[in-house]
Amino acid sequence: MTLGTPGTPGTPGTPGTPGTPGTPDTEAGHAPHGGREPDTAARHTGSVVLAFPPLVESSFGRYFPSTAVLAGFLQSRKVRTHQWDLNEEFALHLLDPGHLAEAGAGRLVGLEGCYPEEMSAVAGRWLARHHDALFDEHGRHTFAAESGPAFLLSALAQPYLIDPEAEWLTDPSLLRSDRTLVYRAYYASLGLAARLPADARLLGVSVPMGPQLVPALLLAEAVKRIRPEVRIVLGGPTLSLMNEDDLAGLLDVHRQVDAVVRFDGEAPLLALYRQADTGDWRPTEVAGVSAVAEGSPVHTPPTAGLHPNALPPAAYDPALMARLVGPEMGIVQARGCYWGKCDYCDFVELYDGSPPYRGRSVQSFMAELEHQVSTHGVRRFELITESIPPAFARRFAQAVIDRGLDITWNSFAMVDRRFDAELLQLMVRAGCEYLVIGMETTNTRVLKLVHKSADREENLRFIREAHQAGMKLRINLIPDLPSTTLEEAMESLRDVAELADCIESFTVFPFEATRSSEVGRNPERFGLVVGDDGPGLANQAQYALNHLGNIDPAMTREERTGVHRAYQDFAIGHGSSHMRRTGDEFLDRLPGEDEAFRLGVASLDVLPRGDELVVTHVLRRERTVLPAAVARGLAPWLDGTPLTRRDLTDAYGTAGGATVLRQLVEARLLTAVAATGHPEPALA
């Protein structure tokens, strides 16, 4: 179901695509029962609720477009809709003072043990003291900020992530286990009985990410308890990529789910709503729908989905937009990937029944963009696409310039020789803020094996020319694509390290074979041996149900672990100015003899561990352990009281004081006395 749209680098999603306002739905096979029914308000007596459940911590502070896309389509058919961003509300639930106090003590809802040194506990303690740091003066959320302390919200949520294994589909008792207590308490706090509109006929739940599946099932349970007549439909990439046996198990056991839509979802969702609205519930007669019929799950094959140009603009809810600072709006450029050949990629599997690529026209895209600017005043946009085609990028950039639009935008992109220096410069002039590049590696042999477009020389050329054009790049790396040797992995790391100054940031994804990709279907072609890959190497993609256990003999386990560590250390060490900003207030030099300074306590979490102190720098996202001797000497100044070099000399002696001072400066733990140490400016 198109209840999921790609929006976060490295995570799967299925675009729901807005299009030219008023374009009629005339393509063959799109009407739910073979022919277009007239859409009149009189025929529709009820409404649809579209929900985006937890947990996608990377979407905190962002408006995930899936519900807006579906709402735009349904509203164009005279169906009333309501949108619930329950993921964003879950973030607010975690920021409740009571939860922060427990988390800060190392205790998490439904989880055993006490872990005060974990980042979730650091987040609980720091946010309890600086709750307002995640909101502006109007109470709007800064949860999506890429610098400052916003990352602590993700750290606070991370322990509650459930990436379900197969037993979650077949054992309903797991939904009532302590592991789900945080979600059950959250849904109980929402007052669903009062929130659910009286005329609601159907609840559509968008499940693009694997960790949303369990909360989605719990939401369905909670709604069915209070309103059993409301039909509950799940959709999104998590369901589209699920194999039919697992999906049948889910439907057979979790009867709170009335239907699942796979692949394109607009027409199936409209058909299911009409059935729910009239009381004539026959879901297995709708193409692309899986449901239980006569006691057994039935999977009805999909038909071709709508072309992106045939859909109306996405209907973003002004109330949901208004609570975000500087919201970025997603507009779909295409469904599918124009390249579509990368053997490790799942995205090409999300459109069964439809052409593998359906690109939107620049005219249609610009019509929606200008509609959203005039409707919401938004100036920041994300192009929702697996990879922006160079030809579209050229025409789109020129259209933005020709129309004098004052916007910024970003997109996923693939290294493609047609992104030459001239085009990259044109895109920058048209407001392209950055590109996210799935480069993966620079090794030509491996790139050819998995059918990437570019080779080593093309990748390096692209990076240099993008930098010269002023284009910011965020590079995704997979250090251990199938058959990569230790030598090849480290050679690729040396390549990107030499060009690190040209790149804003790196994100590292250990390779994971997925069942729904070409690698997963034919692992032997890529040198993989199917089997248990052991702990620590699986499920980084946050979708355990789609994971294919395998062993890649090209590297030993120890070599692979070392490669992962080397790449992660490089990415963290490289950082970027906006991700590791400390601000001018943190001393990066040794102060003068009589110059007063102090510990920047407002930006630090200080946790006693025996006689030591574990100090976490919230802005730099780094941790320093102060040994007992250093901790004792600093005790008088741990509250931010000013001190000088003479004070340190008195506490540690001449040599010791100089050493401690140098280490505190290197760790960026000191500020000038006049500085506030307050991290909010780094959120800008």
Image (cartoon, rainbow, N blue to C red):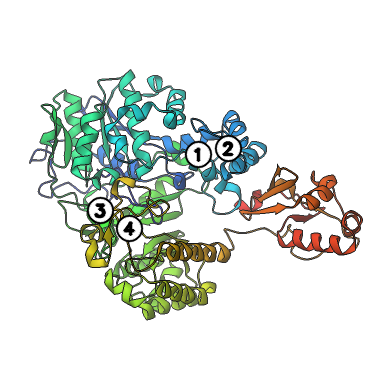
Residue 16 in sight from this viewpoint: no
Asked if the residue under mark 2 is in contact with the one under mark 4, i.e. CB atoms within 8 Å, the reply is: no
Give the quadrant of residue 458: bottom left
| Element marked by disc 3 | loop
| Marks 3 and 2 in Cβ contact (< 8 Å) | no
Q: Distance between the residues labelled 3 and 1?
A: 39 Å
Q: Residues within 10 Å of mark 4 (few under 14, many from 20)?
A: many
Q: CB under 8 Å between callouts 2 and 1?
A: yes
**Alpha-carbon distance for marks 2 and 1?**
7 Å
Q: Would residue 591 be found to the left or right of residue 181 on screen?
A: right
Residue 635 point in image, percent of width and height: 82, 46
According to the image, label 3 marks what residue? Answer: 515
Q: Nearer the viewer, mark 1 or mark 4?
A: 4
Q: Residues within 10 Å of mark 2 (few under 14, many from 20)?
A: few
- Whether label 3 touches label 1, CB < 8 Å: no
Q: Could you tell me the amino acid type at mark 2?
A: Gly
Q: How far apart are marks 1 and 4 (CA)?
A: 26 Å
Residue 217, given in percent of the width and then of the height, sits at 32, 32
- Please state which amino acid type lies under the numbered disc 3: Arg
Quadrant of the image occupied by residue 225: top left
* Residue underneath mark 2: 139
Q: Which amino acid does label 4 sit on?
A: Thr
Q: Is residue 558 visible?
A: yes
Query: Which residue shows up at 35% across the image and 69% down it?
Result: 554
Reading the image, the residue beneath label 4 is 385
